[in-house]
Image (tube, grey):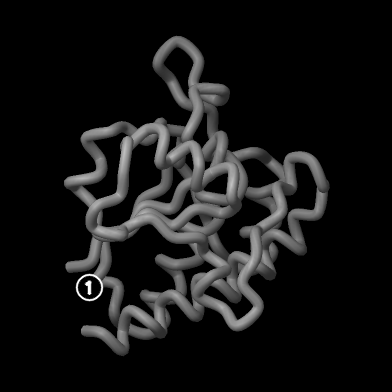
């Protein structure tokens, strides 16, 4: 089983969207049993008193437009000890990448990647918290998750 952790800054927009998009795509292909998928944040910004905030409502609405639910998901923070528990850490942008490396200290097994690096265009998934473009973020995440899944299935 391949264990994947999607990562963004707060774990309320992009990384939970990626978690549930990937799960949906894997289920549609009949391969969900081959993957364990989670998401987390590089910061504690959305964790108050030890309790994570739920997925940001505009992200919930964008997922719902595509028939995807993220009910019950709450923000959690990435921890150093997670490195040994997952096969891949898929981040959304360069700042996430830097913050992941700060948390882990290093990446000796080359597990940390950007989502859109799996696509032909590469690049970063813009943060819809700032852009307000949840539709664009969803499109990038969907495209990235689809190519990531196909890439992983070719290796299995």
Place of residue 37 in the rendered image (x, y in percent of width and height, measured from the top left)? 33, 57
**Residue at coordinates 57% horizontally, 68% vertically from top-left?**
116
In this orientation, which residue lies closer to the viewer: 85 or 21?
85
Place of residue 107 in the rendered image (x, y in percent of width and height, measured from the top left)? 30, 49
Q: How many marks?
A: 1
Callout 1 secondary element:
helix
Q: Which residue is mark 1?
A: 34
- Residue 108, compared with residue 43, is above or below; it is below
Would residue 46 appear left or right of 26 to someone viewing this image?
Answer: right
In this orientation, which residue lies closer to the viewer: 46 or 154?
154
Would residue 154 appear left or right of 149 to someone viewing this image?
Answer: left
**Residue at coordinates 59% horizontally, 71% vertically from top-left?**
142
The residue positioned farthest toward the top in the image shown: 49
- Residue 22, compared with residue 126, is above or below; it is below
Place of residue 105 in the rendered image (x, y in percent of width and height, measured from the top left)? 32, 36
- Residue 110, compared with residue 59, is above or below; it is below
């Amino acid at each position: 089983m391949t264990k994947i952790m999607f990562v963004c800054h707060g774990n309320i927009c992009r990384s939970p969207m990626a978690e549930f998009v990937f799960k949906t795509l894997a289920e549609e292909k009949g391969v969900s049993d081959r993957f364990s998928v989670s998401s987390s944040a590089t910061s504690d910004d959305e964790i108050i008193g030890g309790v994570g905030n739920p997925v940001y409502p505009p992200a919930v609405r964008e997922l719902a437009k595509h028939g995807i639910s993220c009910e019950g998901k709450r923000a959690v923070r990435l921890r150093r000890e997670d490195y040994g528990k997952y096969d891949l850490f898929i981040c959304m942008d360069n700042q996430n990448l830097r913050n992941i490396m700060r948390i882990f200290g290093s990446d000796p097994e080359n597990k940390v990647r950007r989502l859109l690096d799996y696509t032909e265009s590469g690049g970063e998934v813009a943060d819809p918290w700032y852009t307000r473009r949840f539709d664009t973020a969803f499109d990038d995440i969907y495209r990235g998750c689809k190519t990531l899944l196909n890439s992983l299935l070719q290796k299995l």
